Image (spheres, rainbow, N blue to C red):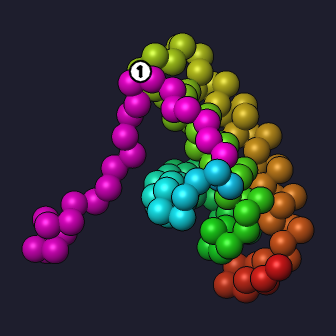
């Protein structure tokens, strides 16, 4: 562990006491958008690593595609609610069912973007 690591400890995914409140990206201020994107980026990194998703599933440039931000943030919101302290016992299983369906939708969105690993295609 370096001195910098001790000063800036790794961010961890929080466990919520209750489900989060949904929001609309277009209604956020630029500052709030940035903060939510930072949280989403942390979670997407965890998701990719935990479920061994390759970059064809979630490309590095997902932040550049509003449709992927919407899909991933909806999945993140559902994950937070499923693992909140107030969630029911089968909520994680239901989340995994939603995750399976979301992976297909995300793959469809990625195919439409034309992006490939290390090859971003702008709009």
In the picture, measured across the screen, residue 1 lies left or right of residue 100, that is left
Is residue 8 highlighted in magenta?
yes
Q: Position of residue 111 (x, y in %)?
A: 87, 67
**Residue at image location 70% in from the left, 79% down from the top:** 117
* Quadrant of residue 10 within the rendered picture: bottom left
**Residue at image location 32% in from the left, 55% down from the top:** 11
**Residue at image location 80% in from the left, 66% down from the top:** 110
Along the line of sight, which residue is nearer the eye, 67 or 105?
Answer: 67
- Number of marks: 1
Residue 36 visible to an observer of this rendering: yes
Q: Position of residue 16 (x, y in %)?
A: 40, 31
For label 1, the SS is loop
In the picture, measured across the screen, residue 44 lies left or right of residue 116, that is left
Main structural element of the magenta stretch: helix, strand or loop?
Answer: loop
**What is the magenta range?**
1-24
Image quadrant where one finds the N terminus: bottom left
- Residue at the spot of label 1: 85
* Quadrant of residue 96 within the rendered picture: top right
Q: Position of residue 80 (x, y in %)?
A: 52, 35
**Residue at image location 83% in from the left, 50% down from the top:** 105
Along the line of sight, which residue is nearer the eye, 29 or 40?
Answer: 29
- In this picture, is 68 found above or below 78? below
Work out which residue is located at the far left of the displayed protein and give it. 3
Question: Dot 1, crowdedness within 10 Å: few (<14), some or many (≥20)?
Answer: few
Is residue 106 highlighted in magenta?
no
Residue 57 visible to an observer of this rendering: no
In the picture, measured across the screen, residue 26 lies left or right of residue 108, that is left
């Amino acid at each position: 562990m370096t001195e910098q690591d001790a000063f800036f400890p790794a961010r961890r995914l929080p466990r919520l006491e209750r489900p989060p409140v949904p929001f609309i990206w277009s209604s956020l201020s630029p500052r709030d958008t940035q903060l939510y994107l930072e949280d989403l980026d942390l979670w997407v990194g965890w998701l990719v690593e935990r479920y061994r998703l390759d970059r064809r599933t979630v490309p590095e440039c997902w932040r550049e595609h509003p449709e992927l931000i919407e899909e991933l943030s909806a999945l993140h919101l559902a994950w937070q609610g499923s693992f909140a302290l107030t969630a029911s016992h089968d909520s994680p299983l239901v989340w995994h069912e939603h995750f399976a369906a979301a992976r297909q939708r995300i793959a469809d969105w990625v195919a439409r973007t034309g992006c490939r690993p290390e090859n971003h295609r702008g709009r």
